[in-house]
Image: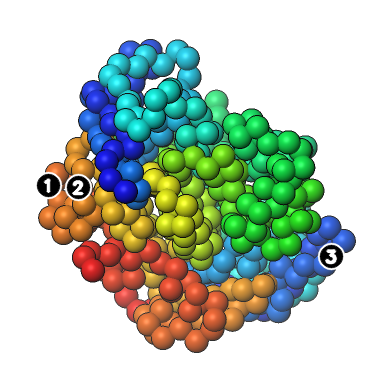
Amino acid sequence: MSGNLLEIRGLSVSHAGAFALRAVDLDIHAGAKLAVIGESGSGKTTLALSLAGLLPPEALVEGRVDWPGLDRAPLTGRDTGLVFQDPAASFNPVIPVGEQVAEGARRHLGLGRKAAHELARNLLERVHIPDPEAALTAYVHQFSGGQLQRIAIAAAIAARPRLLMADEATSALDTVVQASIVALLEELVREEGMTLVFITHDLALASNLADTIAVLKDGILVETGPTDQVLVSPAHPYTRRLLDAQIDLSAPRLVGEAC
Amino acid sequence: MDVPLLAAKGLSKTFASRGRRVAALQDVAFTLKRGETLGLVGPSGSGKSTLARVLMRLIEPQAGSIHFNGDDWLKLEGRALRERRGAIQMVFQDPLSAFNPRATIGSALAAPLRVHGFADGVAELLARVGLTASLAERGIHEVSGGQRQRVAIARALATRPSVIVFDEAVSALDASVRGQILQLIADLQQSEGLAYLFVSHDLAAVRVIAHRIAVMDQGRIVECGPTQDVVSNPQSSTLKALVAAVPRLRKGG
């Protein structure tokens, strides 16, 4: 696969005069695994919503987002799948998850009730939900956070989008579950040939998943490059600061041994 | 001093959940010395937060005892409990939902000072957590996440506790802020001799701040020891999984 799935040119988004994104230029290669790194208020969610066509109507948008391989306007859910931080808030609590998982496919692929049911079962199996048949008729509150995030991923890929975006999709999960969700995303992207945009504040997590890293700060894209290059020789001082702030198992300890 | 500040023994708590009985705590014991941090790690649902809440007297266990500061902590009732309760404070993951959303920073800090009859002021508390006094007039929602967590720590300090329980207190913070808050927590311990129970699923953060680590799984402490020993040579499958799950910065290859 080659070429760009997406070409973002001079994209600015503002709400009531306050800029959330400023003049962002970014190419996303088809089949890429792009990590967008940003802290609170960096504009990373606004970027995801822009690409998914989900910006609120009052947002002022300048610039362009082109899909070179697409001869029509991109459709939310059909061409883009989105996974958010809180899966419980992404589902309707009073409708069985099976119906919701297949909703995108029914709408965009025109599947009938029976075919949609079959697809939902396959999708739940695909994201490794145990006993998918039983899960179809279960409700949001019956799943753990990790399971629910798997189901949200199943719903996001139901219409076989080219672009899967995960916005802090693992941040609310404990580290063990987080690792399993990252492994699932990797597996799906590899096997389905999707392009992944993985939005996170966690540079270490991104380094294990992404081939490209883009760093956002205060709505400005301060650095983009291959993962190894950005991590080994960051061009922007902010990226360097983020790298220095990483806390892993070799970080200096702040206390002595047992007192 | 060899007598621990706090000693918990035989703590057990079972919840009924969807017709099943879930043992959130099973015969849990631990000690905490003055000026010491015990890190409590474990996956979601391992019982960490239940243990923290038992310590705070927010949940009553079915069995067990806690000796704290010369008191039989779980037996304290009414006035005696109210008078001593400020000695153990808690800092939560999400400070936004831990404060009255309409409160100013000043009023949120003034309330515990007044209730517990302390004469020191809001400005003094803010200074101890590295914030300027001018912040007192701002609303809780008007400041950054890091500043808000500093205010939450200041509020915990207001009642002059000897123990502070941190429940995932740095987990939701941006990476660049997380280190600063951990530093503040360590500095306060140094200068004030506080004991901490630092609860988190984030082993990397716990390793940085804790003298000792206890590992919980399914309501039991499955492993416990000095931080470096425990992390560098995990024995339980629970801790091995937690060590393996810490995201490592991968550069090249």
Separation of marks 1 and 2 at Cα, in angstroms = 9 Å
Eyeballing the image, is B89 above or below A39?
A: below
The local crowd at label 2, few if under 14, some if 14 to 19, many if 20 or more residues have their Cα within 10 Å, is: some
The x and y percentages for residue A103 are 66, 36
Q: Which residue is mark 3?
A: B20
The local crowd at label 3, few if under 14, some if 14 to 19, many if 20 or more residues have their Cα within 10 Å, is: few
Question: In terms of depth relative to the viewer, which is nearer, B208 or A155?
Answer: A155
- Horizontally, is B123 left or right of A131 in the view? left
Question: In terms of depth relative to the viewer, which is nearer, B172 or A12?
Answer: A12
- Determine the secondary structure under disc 1: loop
Give the colouring mode of the picture. Answer: rainbow
Separation of marks 2 and 3 at Cα, in angstroms = 51 Å
Determine if residue B100 is in view: yes
Question: In terms of depth relative to the viewer, which is nearer, A5 or A16?
Answer: A5
The local crowd at label 1, few if under 14, some if 14 to 19, many if 20 or more residues have their Cα within 10 Å, is: some
**Marks 2 and 1: in contact by CB < 8 Å?**
yes
Question: In terms of depth relative to the viewer, which is nearer, B119 or B226?
Answer: B226
Question: Which numbered circle lies on residue A116?
Answer: none
Q: Nearer the viewer, mark 2 or mark 3?
A: 2
Determine if residue B69 is in view: no
Question: Which numbered circle lies on residue A235?
Answer: 1
Question: Which numbered circle lies on residue A225?
Answer: 2
Eyeballing the image, is A84 above or below A135?
A: above
Identify the residue at image location x=60%, y=57%.
A126
Residue type (three-letter) at the residue carrying disc 1: Ala
Residue type (three-letter) at the residue carrying disc 3: Arg
| Chain letter belonging to callout 1 | A
Eyeballing the image, is B185 above or below B172?
A: below
